[in-house]
Image: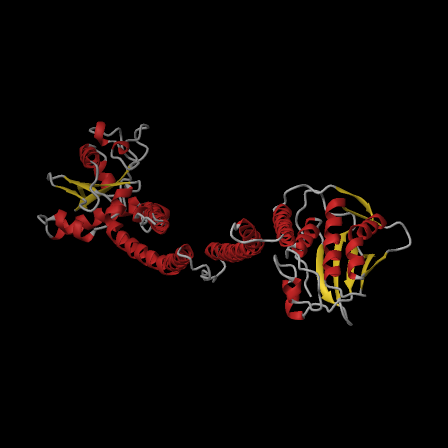
Amino acid sequence: MADVVWYRSLYWRIAFGFVALLAMLLGAQGVVFLWLTGRMADIFPSRTPAQFAASLATEVGAVLVEDPGADLSTYLNRTYASPYRAFAIAMADGRTVVSDRVPPPASLLRAARGRLVAERGDGGDTQRARRPGGSGRGRGPDPRGDARGFGRLPGLRGGGGPGDAGFGGVEYARVLVGGEVVGMVAVPRGAPPIWIALRALGPLLAGVAFVLLALGTAVAALVIFRPTHRRLSQLQASARAIGAGQVGVRAPVVGGDEVTSLSRAFNEMAEQLEARTDALESADRTRRQLLADVSHELMTPLAAIRGYVETLQMSDVRIDQASRVRYLGIVNDESERLEHIIGDLLDLARLEGGGGALRMETVPVAHLFERLHHRHEHALGGRGVELVTLQPPDAATIHADRTRIEQAVQNLVANAIRHTPSGGRVTVSFSRSGDADVIAVEDTGSGIPAAHLPRIFDRFYKADESRTGTQLPSGSGLGLSIVQAIVMRHGGSVRAANLPGAGARFEIRIPVGGAPPSSGAGAEPSIG
């Protein structure tokens, strides 16, 4: 058996599929989390963009009051290190400050400069600047002129408008020192891009995802793959053992999943295979025994024929006419015996092999019994045995193959006559028992020892070995085997038993209506 390529293994495919699915789920979950995190300021805001801009402007103004030359970029990026907000500050002295954590678009700083120029260049900006809380919310120049204390502000070309700064608009806040506008803070209104949150939280989420993936893979390997792999390995070992000839090996059946069903089906297959193996071994033993029996049965008449023929051929031995006639008679008898054995073997082979379809018809029982008297009249007179046939008063019939059923009954009667002493009686009867027609043959012989009853229908079983007091020569030993094969072809059964007093009883049971012509099956006869 070829080794399994690891990347084509079912276990690895399941494992890779599971891990890939888990990784995709974790990745999708992380992306969604980052997307929500990037917009959390809008969904669950702690400070709005306008408040953030006002806070920056106030902080810058306070720092400049204390130290006009302070490093605003370092201070603000350390104090306002929010990973979700970008900002840009343009100062009147030319200094600029932009956020490091969330780099703003270039247009945001231009917008802050443009707004600063507009604020400082307008005549009304001083009054605007001195209003408490005047943050100057960045909604761009008011086209209606003076609605909020501004006229049309110059300098807000191209990059000065709020829509040009990106992020969906800009919020502005003035940086005031001593009531004078010295700078302008610009903060985008919209949420930052998702890559901002990804850069901030990606490493942490990736580490957590890797730990979860490792834990999930370990749990799946211990709970799912390892037990399944172990049980499938045991099933594979059982299959290899059966292939090596150990038909008694069975796969363990534990759990209630598909592997259990597979193991159960494998065990059923193994049991059937074991039964068939036993049947084949039994058939082989039977075949060997049959060959030995056939060889023995054929060699006996052949040896006799050859011996007497060689005697007759001896030129130096003078044989009188009477001896010559007697020798030729023995050769003729042995030849007929050999012919009968071969004919019975062929007949038995056809019956057991299903050859030849049965010609089912209605057979009168009276006619069948009448032919028994005609067939065995000479043997009955020579043995001094009486043949009695009993049948119901009405015209009883049996549905069977006329030739074959007569052959079966004739064999039973011949066997009974052979083993019934002089002055005895053979009784043949017919009855109907439930759904079966019953033909029984009884004799008044010595019966069959119980130890021999199980073998009474075996091929070449000699009744003389189990009966005593017989004077007729034994048959071929195939008569009862032929009876059994005929009855089984009719879907019936045959059995042998001893009578309470003395003698034996053979009983044939044929289903009422008979078996279909194509049916060659039947239950094994119950012996005893």
Pick the residue in front: 320 or 126.
320
Work out which residue is located at the far bottom of the displayed protein and give it: 501
Task: Please tell me whether residue 235 is drawn above or below residue 194 in the rendered image.
Answer: below
Task: Please tell me whether residue 403 is drawn above or below residue 248 in the rendered image.
Answer: above
How far across and down, in percent of the image, does residue 211 sit? 29, 57
How far across and down, in percent of the image, does residue 267 sit? 49, 57
Judge left or right: residue 322 versus residue 368: left
Judge left or right: residue 4 versus residue 275: left
How far across and down, in percent of the image, does residue 494 sit? 71, 57
Judge left or right: residue 438 versus residue 518: right
Rendered residue at 80%/53% (across/down)? 377
Pick the residue in front: 226 or 495.
495
Q: Is residue 37 visible?
A: no
Judge left or right: residue 297 versus residue 518: left
User: Considering the image in quadrants, where does the C terminus appear?
Assistant: bottom right
How far across and down, in percent of the image, does residue 393 sit? 91, 54
Pick the residue in front: 299 or 118.
299
Which picture quadrant has residue 523? bottom right
Rendered residue at 41%/54% (across/down)? 243
Which picture quadrant has residue 228? bottom left
Which picture quadrant has residue 120? top left
Pick the residue in front: 288 or 284.
288
